Each structure stands twice: as C-alpha cells, then as structure tokens.
Image (cartoon, grey):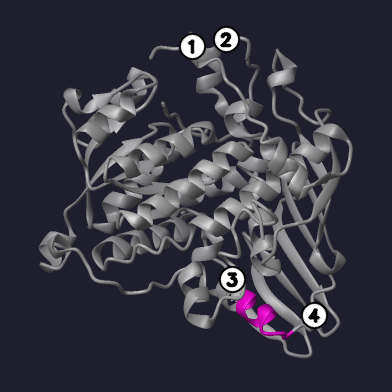
Amino acid sequence: MMYFASGKDWSGPSSIYAMAQKARLGQPLEHSLLSGASRGLDRRRFLAGAAGFTILLAKPQWVRGAEAASSIRLGLIGCGGRGNWIADLFNQHGGYRFVAVADYFADRALKTGSRLGLPEDKCFSTLSGYKRILDLKPDAVVIESPPYFHPDQTWDAVEAGCHAFVAKPIAVDTPGCKRFLQAGRRATEKKLCVWVDFQTRANELYQECVRRVRAGDIGQIVSAEAVYYTGGTWGGHADLKDPETRMRLWGRDRILSGDIITEQNIHALDVATWFLDHDPLRAYGACTKRGRQDPATASDLVCHDAFTCVFVFPEDIPLSFASKQYGTGVEDIGCWIFGPKGTAETHYFGQVLIRGEKSYKGGKLGNLYTDGAVANIAAFHRAITQGDFSNPTVAPSVRSNLTTILGRTAAYRRAEVSWEEMLRADEKLEFPLQTLKS
C-alpha cells in the first residue's frame, strides 16, 4: 500500500545541507527488535556492516562480465531534489540504467524522466505510480520518497523481486521500522539486496575509528555525546493544512518526515549507536518550535526547531544529544565517545580521530555527503553482482531509526520513555492519504 515520492528542498545559505548542495556538483523487539543482529560482530561481519561484502554464489545473469554487470535496470521512486541528484550519481557509476521514474506529482516525474532520457509512458504519478515501475520488473529501485513511504515501498519492491536502494531514514514510526526489518529479512530469503544510504558508514575513517573503539583503544565507554547543529532548511511560509502542499513540502511536515530528529538528526544518532552497539534502554528530553523565523500554519503539523535528549544505554552509559535547525553561527554533525583512556571524535564535515593513550590520527573528510553516497552506490552494485544478499545495512539502520523515535517520543511527552514501552505502544503516524490522488 505505498505511494509517492518527492524530494528535499535545500535552503538556508549557512546550513550544512546548503553546503552539501554546493558540494554535490560536491534482545527484543523483546528487548531488542534486532535480536542481537548487530552485536558481537567479528571483524569480517563488522566490515560487511560498514562497507565490506561477504561473497556468496552470484546469480548466473550477473557473472557474464562487464557487459552484464553494467546493465542493472533501475526505477527511481521520488523525483525531487535528492532524487534527481542521486540519479546523476547512479548514472556516473556506469553500472546502472534508469528505465522508469515515479513521483506523486506528474510535473516532477515528467521533468525528471526527460532529464534521464525516458519516454513519457515511463514516467508515472499519483500515490500508486511507483507500482507501475514494479510492474515493469526492473532489477532494482532507488527509493528517494518522503520517509513516511519507505517501509511499504521497500516491502513492495522486494515482493516484486527488485533490489532496493533506500534513503535514510527508513521509517517515521515503530510499525514502519518493524516492516522495514521484515522487508530486509524477506529480501535475504529471496536473494535480493536492500541497501540503506548512510554516508558515514561507507567511510573508511569512520569504520576504522569505530573498530578501534570497539577493540578497547579508549577503554570501556563511559559516556557519549552527539550533536546536529545547522541553520534552517525547507524555508518559506507554508500552509500545511492542504495535503498536497504537505506532500510538496514534506520536510516541514512532522508526519511525512518523522520530524527533524528522525529525518535529519539521525545522522548523528546513527554514528553514536554504531559506536555503542546497543539499543538504548530509555530516554527523556524536550523540543521546541521557537527558533524559526518563518513559521508555517497548522503548527501542530510542523517540524520542531530543536531537540535535547538524554539516552541511557546498558551499563548506565549516558548519551547526551542536542540539535537545532535554525539561526547561524554553529554548524556541526558531531559525535564524541568518552573512555578513561581516550576520546573518539567524529565530524561529518570535519575530522575523525581518537585522542588518548592509543591515538588515531584519522583524517579530515572531503565531501562526505557526495562521497558517501557514491560509495554506497558502488557497494549496492557489488552486492548485486557478487550475490551478497546478507543486507548488512538493514539492522543497524532500524536500530538508529528506533533510537530517534524513542528520543522524539520522550521529547514530545516531556517524560522518560523506555525502549520496551515504545515498542509495546507501536504508535503509528497517520497521514490523510484518502484525500490524495490514488
């Protein structure tokens, strides 16, 4: 039952995303939903979870050399800014070929299809337009729709026999996270690949820093901190009372996007949970809408400006988290992991290093926003052509996504919320899809 796609509106001249836009062209769901899927990894599985691959028996159609490997037929679901940008990166790889596109809005689908050299009859619209792509039986789909739609679109793609490359976050609510995890497991059963596009996890400096921390180079982790500070994005006045306007401006809409803590701040929390390698036990927090100078109408539907949360992990390890998405002066997506023998430090647009008894010089990142996506596009291609259907990015992405939902729930309630309570409540966000073109 899923639907549409539209892209990100990049605005705010000092925002991290504005910098990225310029750079483009630069145990449970019982204790752990993941059932230990990402715990206790040996080096081989750890590297697979980051960017390496377990080589399995490849499909015959993918072992006929460069000619076959270069013909992965793609459908693009989501023709907004991010969808068009990443489509260019897929084309630059050389191992893919777009055969169809879909977006809720016909104008976007037709414009993107024209850019990609597709005929109009391969450009689909309305909520069910993406299903027309699946009917064409492409090898894979690239899902760049609003996060609200990711779980069902991924599930439907897998059921149709398609590999899926999916933008983060993978869901906006707990039921969506569960469905996405099921889709990943189903894909492995069907010998299909589902790949989640977290740029940091594709970067060798991040991978080595995490490996060293897990190896004990800073001693036992005592505490951690993560931040996501940026200027405003998705600027401009918007009347979010109209469902189609909400679809066009989904980044301002807390239902379609999951709010900023899930849609954007997840970059910082994903790195923190990667280091800590556990589900948080509980969280408490607060959030506000006081920072933006361009408030939208229907404010109950509008994303917040800032979140502050404290997550408590096993062994009483606290993770403090703060984000803002307004103003100027401070721009960082950072994480600090503190131990008695040192501190690991990462910055999305800066350095990755360890200071302490066993220092790691690491290095300064280039354009991680683009470079990480390029690495993931290459990893997706290798996984398909080499027959690796272990889908190592799925479980970690579900964990970090649920962590953002835990923080969001605690901040909305201004109360402490446990991981188990969040999973039991299974709260679903609802959008009035019945008012849109089906």
- Would you say residue 329 is visible in this rendering? no
Measure the C-alpha gap from mark 3 to mark 1.
43 Å
Q: Residues within 10 Å of mark 2 (few under 14, many from 20)?
A: few
The residue labelled by disc 2 is 242
**Residue found 40% across the figure and 43% down from its top:** 85
Tell which tag, 3 or 4, sits nearer the viewer: 4
The residue labelled by disc 4 is 220
Q: Which residues are magenta?
A: 209-217
Main secondary structure type of the part rendered in magenta: helix
Per the rendering, the mark at residue 206 is 3
Per the rendering, the mark at residue 298 is none
Q: Is residue 307 above or below residue 59?
A: above
Residue located farthest toward the bottom when viewing the structure as drawn: 357
The residue labelled by disc 1 is 434
Q: Residues within 10 Å of mark 4 (few under 14, many from 20)?
A: some
Tell which tag, 3 or 1, sits nearer the viewer: 1
Position of the C terminus, as image quadrant, is top left
Cβ atoms under marks 1 and 4 closer than 8 Å = no
Please state the horizontal and vertical placement of residue 80, each as a whole percent of the image.
43, 31
